[in-house]
Amino acid sequence: MTLRCPVVELRRYTLHDGRRDELITLFEREFVETQEATGMTLIGQFRDLDDPNRFVWLRGFPDMARRSVALHDFYGGPIWQRHRDRANATMVDSDDVLLLRPLDDRSGFPAPTGVRPPADVPPATGPARPPSPVVVATICRRTAPVDAGFADLFRHLVAPALAEAGGAPLACLRTEYAENTFPALPVRTGEHVVVWFSRFADVEQVETHLRRLDRSVRWQTEVLPELAATLDGAPERLRLVPTARSALR
């Protein structure tokens, strides 16, 4: 099976107060097609539902070598050079980046099913606006590298239990241990993480899923103890609302 994005960056930016929408407007007008023109895939852009000053996004690459070429082309190119000062002025920190790859050959992000709206179409507003979908990213940290044993545990025990509770994983990624091929953009190193992503119709569906896990005897007595035994601390959960032009939504 050919993976759509064998290398993925999960990027979390902390922004100055009140400037998230400013960055998103600039990003979605100037940085979507221009990044993809270099060979990247813009998987998704999100507002963090629990932090008004956090912008989260995902981009993918065919491999580490072509990641280097694509990043050199974009950040050395005219669009970023023209707009970088304005973009950087919105940011407090842009170095919280996890470099990831699919847990196995069946757990990468699927191709988007819809068409990305053009940049000049405003999002729907008002009382008729449909509920916002929510993508939940669950980040699990380990003290040891992610191995085939964990992949087997996730595939055969964790993923089915999540699906039974209404939160089937859309993708599951783990640390990419290759050397950063574009040192000008730092990534977090020395960590062992697994991140799975689930998609929900709205916030209420997320809460329903979590309540089902809390009430699930199987999850509480079988799945969660086995999962927790492989982790270093409790998982971190991000509730992410797709922006207007996010492919993942």
Image (cartoon, rainbow, N blue to C red):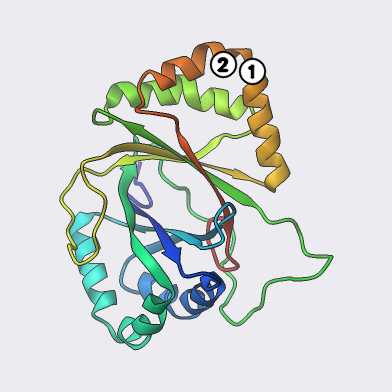
User: Is 189 in front, or is 153?
Assistant: 189
Residue 137 versus residue 166 in the image, above or below:
below
Asked whether, in this view, residue 244 is left or right of residue 27, the answer is right
State whether residue 105 appears in this view. Answer: no
* Residue 190 percent coordinates (x, y): 21, 41
User: Residue 141, labelled with which disc?
Assistant: none
Disc 2 to disc 1, how far (Cα)? 6 Å
Answer whether labels 2 and 1 touch (C-beta < 8 Å). yes
Asked whether, in this view, residue 184 is left or right of residue 31, the answer is left
- Say what amino acid the circle numbered 1 marks: Ser
- Say what amino acid the circle numbered 2 marks: Gln
Secondary structure at badge 1 equals loop
Residue 137 versus residue 229 in the image, above or below:
below
Count of residue discs: 2
Seen at 60% across and 82% down, the residue is 120
Q: Name the residue under label 2.
A: 220
* Residue 128 percent coordinates (x, y): 83, 65
User: Is 192 in front, or is 69?
Assistant: 192
Asked whether, in this view, residue 244 is left or right of residue 150, the answer is right
Seen at 60% across and 34% down, the residue is 167
Q: Mark 1 points at which residue?
A: 216
Quadrant in which residue 219 is drawn? top right
* Residue 145 percent coordinates (x, y): 24, 31
